[in-house]
Every structure is written in structure tokens, then in C-alpha cells.
Image (cartoon, coloured by chain):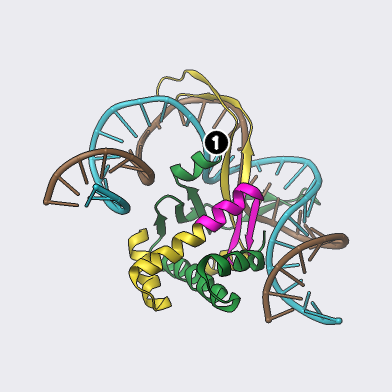
Chain colours: A yellow, B green, C cyan, D brown
DNA sequence: GTTTCTATATGCAAAAAATGCATACCCAAT
DNA sequence: ATTGGGTATGCATTTTTTGCATATAGAAAC
């Protein structure tokens, strides 16, 4: 499922036009992003937690050539599913 | 930031009551969850992709006793940040 | 205010991620 | 409808993550 299809579903569930549903959805993702930029985690009960994880610089390898490569430190957003979320998929 | 604080922000950004903002937010997470149950991935452009990942069974260990334990296969929801999302945090 | 949920911390083995890059593909926006 | 761009895939190897049991503390939900 892609964003467009999701927006259609939301449009129905929220009783909004597609344009409004999309705006609403974008507002939410942007709000989460902003929160992640300032704070460093966003915890959503019953769903999961978004965290910014710092990765140290390290030595990698180009799998094609085998050549060693220096990899810069970076940050990435991690999502940790909540307990309830795991249970949905494991029974 | 927790869910309550997020809802307050959304309430302002979406010009909704807190109760409505929370309902809207819950509707969205539930819609994503439902989609994940049926389909197995939800792709949100500019944000990321939620996927159900299968984990193989394997041998674990009780960290308290050191005793070996068989861990059953399971499924978990993975979030893969989109390129745009990575860039936000790496510059 | 009570109760449920989550983070943490522990050691360790196995699974998974990450890396560059080409290609194919699918989606998004014009 | 077309096109540009992001994304999946495969590859080899090393680093990182995961997840086990369990108690506790702190936070959040109701």
C-alpha cells in the first residue's frame, strides 16, 4: 500500500476530502519529524517509538569490489514497535 | 515526547480539539496497522516504509543464568526511513 | 490514584543491516 | 501520460542489532 491508497482510506475513515486527508496526514508526519529533530524520541503508546539513533563512523566494504571504505558517522530514525504491535503479528 | 504531547501539537496544527486530534491520530495508526495485517508493507513517500519482517527461529540465552533457550520464529514491524528522512538528520 | 506499559541492564549467539552500484520497477508529480 | 526520482534487489563481509528472563523504576494511560 502506498501513500495515495492510504490517503483514500483515511479520507473515508475521517470523513474528509482526499486533499484534506492528505494535508492532515502530512501535518502529522511533519510534526513527528519536527519532534524528532528537537527532542530525540517520540513515543506513541500502543504503536511504537521513533528514535534517532547515532551511528559511529566505521570501516565498511564495497560488496562488489571487496574494497575497504571509510563510512562516516550518521544518524537514522529507528522505529521500535510497541508490545501491542508485536502481539498483533505473533499469534 | 509522548503521545499526549504530540496530540496537543496536532490539535494546534490541525485546528482541532484535543479529543478530535487524538481520534484522528488513532484512526491513522489503526489504518496503517490494518494495512500491515492484510498487505505487508505501507509505503509513505518522504517519510518511510512500514514492513512486516519475518524473523527466523534461533538460539537465545537467558542473560541471568546463561542458559540456552530456543527462540521461536516471529514477525515484527520494521520501519525503513525514506531517503528524505535520512537527509534531515545527516547534514 | 491505580494500573499498565516501557526502558534499562545483564551475556551471548545468531540474524540482520550496511556498504557501492547497476538495473528494473514502481510511484509521484507535472 | 510521461518522466524523473526513489526504491527493491543481489552481491560479500563486517558491524550492529536482536532477543532471551526478570526486576525495578519511571512514565503514561485510564
Q: Is residue B43 magenta?
A: no
Task: Count the numbered circles shown.
Answer: 1
The C terminus of chain B appears in which quarter of the rendering? Answer: top right
Question: In this view of the protein, can residue A1 be seen by the observer?
Answer: no
The N terminus of chain B appears in which quarter of the rendering? Answer: bottom right
* Residue at the farthest top position: A67
Q: Quadrant location of residue A19?
A: bottom left
User: Pointer 1: what residue?
Assistant: B90
Badge 1 crowding class, 10 Å Cα cut-off, few under 14, some 14 to 19, many 20 or more, is few
Up-down: is B78 above or below B28?
A: above
Q: Residue B20, how many percent across, how many down?
A: 54, 77
- What range is drawn magenta here? A30-51
Q: Is residue B5 left or right of residue C23?
A: right
Which element carries disc 1, helix, strand or loop?
A: loop
Q: Is residue D5 left or right of residue D25?
A: left
Residue in the image at 50% along x and 58% along y? A29
Up-down: is B80 above or below A22?
A: above
Q: Residue A40, how many percent across, how many down?
A: 66, 49
Q: Is residue C11 left or right of residue C13?
A: right
Residue in the image at 51% along x and 68% along y? B14
Residue in the image at 57% along x and 77% along y? B17
Q: Is residue A49 magenta?
A: yes
Q: Residue A68, how many percent across, how many down?
A: 51, 19
Residue in the image at 41% along x and 55% along y? B44
Instruction: Give the camera-side residue of B4 and B51.
Output: B4
Question: In this view of the protein, can residue B28 be seen by the observer?
Answer: yes
Up-down: is B14 above or below B62?
A: below
Amino acid at each position: 500500500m502506498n501513500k495515495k491508497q492510504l490517503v483514500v482510506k483515511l479520507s473515508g475513515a475521517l470523513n474528509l476530502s482526499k486533499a484534506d486527508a492528505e494535508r492532515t496526514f502530512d501535518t502529522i508526519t511533519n510534526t513527528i519529524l519536527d519532534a524528532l529533530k528537537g527532542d530525540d524520541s517520540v513515543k506513541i503508546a500502543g504503536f511504537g517509538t521513533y528514535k534517532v539513533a547515532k551511528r559511529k563512523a566505521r570501516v565498511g566494504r564495497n560488496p562488489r569490489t571487496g574494497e575497504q571504505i571509510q563510512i562516516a558517522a550518521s544518524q537514522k530514525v529507528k522505529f521500535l514497535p510497541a508490545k501491542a504491535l508485536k502481539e498483533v503479528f505473533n499469534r
